[in-house]
Amino acid sequence: MEFYMKILAKVAYLGTNYHGWQIQPNGNTVQEEIEKALSKILNNPTKIYGAGRTDAGVHALNQSFHFELNKEMDLERLKYSLNSILPDDIAINSLVEVAEDFHARFCAKKKHYQYRINSGDKNPFLTNTSLYYPYPFVMTKFVEALDKFVGQHNFVNFTSKEEDEDNYIREIFDIRVSLNETIDVDIIGDGFMRYMIRDIIGTCLAVASGKEDLTYISDRLDKDVDAHTAYRASSEGLFLIDVIYK
């Protein structure tokens, strides 16, 4: 009987040097690097299946993917082997066995993202891991604007126009702002479309800085009309914190 095991992996990466997660014809990607490393160690072409895509410049603390093993291996040893040959900006956090019917994308219940904003002095050590925003804005207005997005909404005007979606309804369970070295915005939801979080952050900064008022959001949120937001935050401040399966 042929050996079979399905593995769930958690991986951290700095997205600065990559054209996103998903393999593309042109440009190095995180998925490509992991598949190359796995295939080399297993001596067999191995495909991985991610919980979702992250765009160029976006980072992850715990991105999830699954793959299949057709020979018995110690998972701790496999993790060590992968980390020894992966680039320094990619690290496997954990490998665990999961049920045969598990799928990293379709079994996900929630996703947790964080967006980091440096509103203080220019800091070269934060350049690739936060949005540098040295402009005046009102924090209470920023939080008030973010609160408008909590709940189940139609986000058609806060996602990519190229997004191939039949349904733009998503639910955001919680948005929290904390003041650390950067202003950290934690967003937990059932799923996020391309550019959705960056569009939300960019729009809320526009409201907080006085460029727009709250009606700018209400005129677009839950409105199935062509009124896409004009504001999109850059990619370097966005982190995928975790994919939640329970």
Image (tube, rainbow, N blue to C red):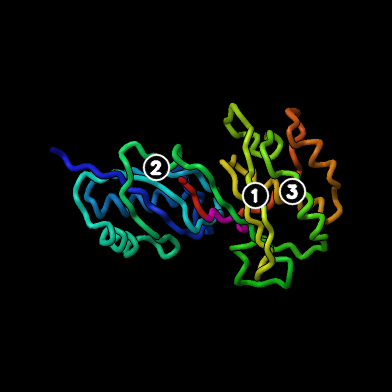
Residue drawn 59% across the image and 44% down it: 189
Specify whether residue 197 is painted magenta: no
Mark 1 residue element:
strand
Q: Residues within 10 Å of mark 3 (few under 14, many from 20)?
A: some
* Residue 79, picture quadrant: bottom left
127 lies above or below 166? below
- Reading the image, the residue beneath label 2 is 49
The residue where tag 3 is placed is 147
**Where residue 106 sits in the image (x, y, percent)?**
45, 37
Type of amino acid at the residue the image marks with label 2: Tyr
Which residues lie in the magenta part?
236-241
- Give how far across and how far down residue 218 sits, in percent: 80, 38
How many angstroms separate mark 3 from mark 2 (CA)? 33 Å
Badge 3 marks a residue whose secondary structure is helix
Tag 1 residue: 174
Q: Is residue 60 left or right of residue 232?
A: left
**Res. 25 visible in picture:** no
- The residue that appears at 34% across and 62% down in the rendered structure is 83
* SS class, disc 2: strand
- Label 1 neighbourhood size at 10 Å, few (<14), some (14-19), many (20+)? some
Numbered disc in front, either 3 or 2: 3
- Looking at marks 3 and 2 on the same chain, the residue that comes earlier in the sequence is marked by 2
Q: Which percent across, then down, holds residue 209?
A: 83, 56
Nearer the observer, 83 or 104:
104
